[in-house]
Image: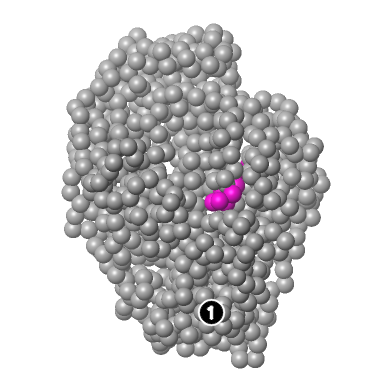
Amino acid sequence: MKRFALWVGWLIVLGMLVVPAVVWAQGVLVVEDPAQSVRLPRPGIIWPPYPPHPPMPRPVPPRPELPPGAYKIQEIEVNARLVDQVAQVQVSQSFVNTGGRPLEVSFVFPLPYDGAVDRLTLMVDGKEYPAKLLKADEARRLYEEIVRKNRDPALLEWIGTGLFKTSVFPVPPGEKRTVVLRYTQLCRKMEGMTDFLFPLSTAKYTSEPVERVGVRVSIESQEDIKNVYSPTHSVEIRRADPRHCAVEMVLKNEVPTSDFRLFYDVGLGKLGARLISFRPDRDTDRDGYFLLLVSPDIKAATAKPVPKTVVFVVDRSGSMSGKKLEQAKGALKFVLENLRQGDLFNVIAYDSDVEAFRPELQRFDDASRRAAVGFVEGLYAGGSTNIDAALRAALRQLQDASRPNYVLFLTDGLPTTGVTNEMKICENAREANRVRARIFTFGVGFDVNARLLERLARDSHGQGEYVRPNEDIEDRVSRLFRRIEAPVLTDIKIDVSLDEHRPEAGPVLNRVYPKGSLDISAGEQLVVVGRYKTPGRAKVVITGSVAGTSQRFDFPAQLVDRSPDEANSFVERLWAIRRVGEILDEIDLKGKNEELIRELVELSTRHGIITPYTSFLADESTNVRDLTGNVRLTERRLAALEQTQGASGVNQRAFRGSLQKAVDAGAVPRAAAEAFKMEPPALPGYPGSKAAASPSGVGGAYPGMALPGGRGAGVAAAAPTYGPALGPVAAEADREMLQAQKNVRQIGNRAFYRRANQWIDSTLTKEQEAKPIRVKQFSREYFELARRHGRSLAQYLVFDEPVMLNLAGQAYLIEP
C-alpha cells in the first residue's frame, strides 16, 4: 500500500522536477538588509491550483510560516515582438511582500545572451528607477558577494552574464510593487534558426505559486515563416498569413522552473526543414542526438490541397445511446462540413450489423454532404458491437493508393459479436488494408480494449486517441481531423547522408521517432528525433508523394562532433522521452523483453523519466545503481499492461501515447498528470493492491482517486483530490508525495537523486563516486570552481544539501 501511494504521489509531483539547462536572466528581488542574511524565497509546499482543495477525510499539511523577507510573484506578463532577428520585449512582474516587515529591495536583471541587450527601461509602479549596467566580470563579483553574504547559492545560476541592478526601493508588508521592464534584444542564430529566450526560471524564487504567467510573442518577417517551435513549453501557434505568426503560452497557479525558449526560421520553397544536433562533450564515444523540424509552405498547401479519402466508422451499439451518440453525430457532421472539393468519403455505422451511407465512396459536393448529414441525423443506438465486420467493410472501399486514405474509427466498447479475438481482428484489418490507409482510433469511455485500438493504429501508422467520460467526442475528433484535412506531402521518408561516410560504418541515423512513413498537412509541423553515430557535414533528404507524384527535397545540415555547452541538451531528453514511449509500446504489443526492460530502467534512471513502472526510483531507499534489482522490480510492475480495458487500460495507453507524441522536453509531467487523472491501475508488486473490479475501473481498491490535468513544462503539478472511500490511504499518499518531491530532480539532461541527505548525479559511475574531490560550499575553492566552469556548472549549484557532480569525468562533492 505504501509503495502504491508513492506511485500515485509521484505522478502528481513529476512536474516539479524539470529544471532547465539554460537558466539566466529575468529579474529577482534581492533584499538589502545589512543586519542579516536574507535568502531568495522558495515555496515550502506547492499548493496549486487555487482555490484550496475541498474538505476531505485526510490531514492536510499546514502551510509553513514564511520568513520575514519573503515575497511572492503574483503575476508575470510578457509581450515580445520579433522582427527578423530583433526582439522588442516588455515584461510586467508584480511582487507582493508576504513577510511581516517592510523590505528594502533592489531589482536584479541578469542579461540574456551575454549582454546582447540595449534600450533597457525599468519602471516601479510607474516611476522610472535608475539601473546600473555591470559587465560579466563586475557582475560575477556582485553575484559572489550576494551569495557569500546571504549563504544562498541561487544567484550562481547566472554567473558569467552581465546584469542591470536598480537602486533600492521599499515594499511595505502586504503591499504590491509592479516592475515593468522594456528592452531590445538581438536574438542568437542557431542552426539557421532565430533563438528567442525569455527566462522565466527565476520565478521559482517565490514564496507561493505564481497566479498567472502569460507569454505572447508576435513574429514578423520579410520572408515566409517556416518552422516555429518551443522546446520548453506547450504553446499555441496561430498563423495570420505566411509572414506573420503569434505564439502564446499561459500558466496558472504554478511555479515555473523552465525558461521560455522559442525557435523560428524563414525561407522560400514548398517545404522548410532545420536540423538541430547535440552531442555531450563528456560522451563523444556515444551517439549524438538530432531534432528535425519540417514545415510546409502555407500558401502552396491552401491554394491546391491534395484530394484525400476519408471513411468515418461510428459505433451505434446500445451503449452509445444518449449523450455519446449525440456527440458522435456532431463529430461526423464536423468532418462532413470540412471536406474539400475532390475528396472522396463515406460513413459506416455499425452495431451487430454494418450499414453504409452509400455502397461505394462518394465524391464530396454540396448534394452529397446534405445527404450524408441526413444519414447521420437518422442514426440510433441499439444492438451489439461487431468491430471486425465494420473495419473490413470500411477498408474494402479504399482502392486508390495514390491518394491519402484515412479511416476514423470510433467505438465505446469491446467486440461482442462476429470475430472477437483481438489478434484476429488486427490480422483481418491488415489484409483488408491494401492501400496503406492510416487508421485513427477513438476509444470513448473506459469500456474499450485499449490494446486492440493501439494495435490497429500502430499497424497502419495511424494514431490512437481516447475520449474520457468527462470529455467531448466532437472536440477530440475535430482536433485530429484539422491535422489531416489538407495534406501537403504523404508517405514521407527521411534520410541523412554525410559528405564523408564509410559504408561499413552502417546507417548514419538510428532509432528515429516517429517510426515509419509520415504525412504532413497545411499548418502542421513534423518534429522528428533520432540518434547518429558519425558526426560531420550532412544532407537531409526528404521524399514523399503528392497525388501520386514523387517529390524530393534536400537540405544541408551539421551533425556536431561535440556540443560546446548544454543549450541544446533538450534534444537528448526529448529523444529519451519518445524512446521510453516506444519501449512501452513494444512491450505492450509484443510481450516482455529483458533487453527492452533493461533499457527502460537505464533511460529512466539517467534522465529522470519516471513512469508508473519505474516510480520506485523516487524512493530514497532504492539503490539507483542496482540495475539488476531495478529491472526485476520494473518487470513485475509491467504486468499492469495486462489490463487492456477499464480506467487502468485506457490511462496506461494514453500515457504511453503522450510520450511517443512528445514535442518538448517537459512532456513527461503533463503526460503523467493528464493520462492518470482518473483512477490509476493497481500495480503488481504493491502490497495490498488489487485489480479494478469492473470493466470501467470503478469499484476497485482505490475508487474515486483523481489527478487533475497539468500544462506547461517544468511546473509544479496540481495536488491530488481523493474520494471519501480512500480514507487513510490518502493521508499515506500525501506523506509519500511530499517525500517524493525531495528525492528526484531533473536539470538539463541529467537527473539527480537524493540519497542519505545527499544529491547524486545520475551520470556518475560507481567508480567515480568512490573518489570524489571534496569542495566546501561558499569557500574560495567553491567560487573558483564556479568561475572555471561557468554556466556548465552553475546550473547544478542550486542544492542546499551536499551534491555529488560529474564534471568532465571527475566526481566533485559540494558540501555545506
Q: Tell me the quadrant of the picture where the N terminus can be found.
A: top right
- Residue 118 position, x and y percent, is 31, 78
- Residue 355 position, x and y percent, is 43, 11
Q: Quadrant of residue 138?
A: bottom left
Q: How is the image coloured?
A: one colour
Is residue 606 one of those drawn in magenta?
yes
Question: Is 493 in front, or is 677?
Answer: 493
Q: Secondary structure at mark 1?
A: helix
Question: Is 519 in front, or is 581?
Answer: 581
Q: Quadrant of residue 4?
A: top right
Determine if residue 682 is in view.
Answer: no
* Residue placed under numbered mark 1 in the picture: 783
Task: Say left or right for 622 vs 778.
Answer: right
Q: Residue at x 31, y 65 (%)?
A: 188
Q: Residue at x 47, y 88 (%)?
A: 167
**Residue closest to the far right:** 728
Q: Tell me the quadrant of the picture where the C terminus can be found.
A: bottom right
The chief SS type of the magenta part is: loop
Residues rendered magenta in the picture:
605-612
- Residue 342 position, x and y percent, is 23, 24
Task: Say left or right for 708 vs 107.
Answer: right
Task: Say left or right for 135 vs 537.
Answer: right
Residue type highlighted by circle 1? Phe
Determine if residue 638 is in view.
Answer: yes
Task: Say left or right for 643 vs 220.
Answer: right
